[in-house]
Image (cartoon, helix red, strand yellow):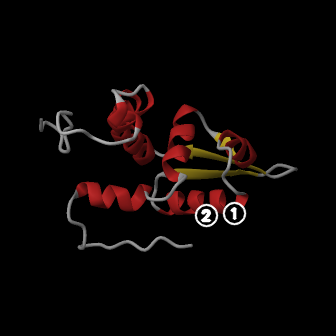
Amino acid sequence: MGTVRRPGAYVCGVDAAMDVIGGKWKVLILWALGQRPFRFGELRRELPGVTEKVLAAQLRELEADGIVHREEYDEVPPHVEYRLTPRGVALNDALGPLGAWGKAHVIEGRGASAAAGQVGEDDDVALVTGAA
């Protein structure tokens, strides 16, 4: 499952970023690796429900995009560790406000519309930094 980029076809920066983090598990992989480096098996246990095949594919895509670094240690048994690159740390930092929004509006909720994952007409949701 290779990632096909659409250079020149992006509508905006959010579109380009979503192309990098698209997929059910990539954001959760970024979140986990933002805590500390993980070996493959540890990361799989940290993300219940992800299959070995999907995790390996998503890690390969993130590595190809320069978001994750895969370090192989010449040991017996073989030891591989994954960590965020500086580019991955910057991406994780950019996702911070999105996580804060999700916590405030979905997890903690703000009435029935928040519990249903809907934005009401009276909700003040900025779609662009600095917009109200």
Say the numbered circle drawn on residue 92.
none
Above or below for 23 versus 94:
below
The image quadrant that residue 131 belongs to is top left
Q: Circle 1 sits on which residue?
A: 53
Helix, strand or loop at disc 1? helix
Of the pair 98 and 8, the residue shown nearer to us: 98
Counting from the top left corner in percent of width and height, residue 3 is at: 47, 70
| Extreme residue in the front direction | 112
Q: Residue at x 48, y 47 (%)?
A: 27
Quadrant of the frame with the N terminus: bottom right
To which quarter of the image does residue 103 belong? top left
Q: Position of residue 129 (x, y in %)?
A: 18, 39
> What residue did someone put label 2 on?
57
Which image quarter is the C terminus in? top left
Q: What amino acid type should be assigned to the residue bearing mark 1? A: Lys
Q: CA distance from mark 1 to mark 2?
A: 6 Å
| Relative depth, front residue between 75 and 63 | 63
Disc 1 crowd, CA 10 A, few/some/many (<14, 14-19, 20+): few
Q: Is residue 57 left or right of residue 112?
A: right
Q: Residue at x 75, y 46 (%)?
A: 41
Dot 2 alpha-carbon crowd within 10 angstroms: few under 14, some 14 to 19, many 20 or more: some
Label 1 close to label 2 by CB (< 8 Å): yes
Label 2 sits on what residue type? Answer: Ala
Q: Name which residue lies at 32% across and 73% down.
A: 6
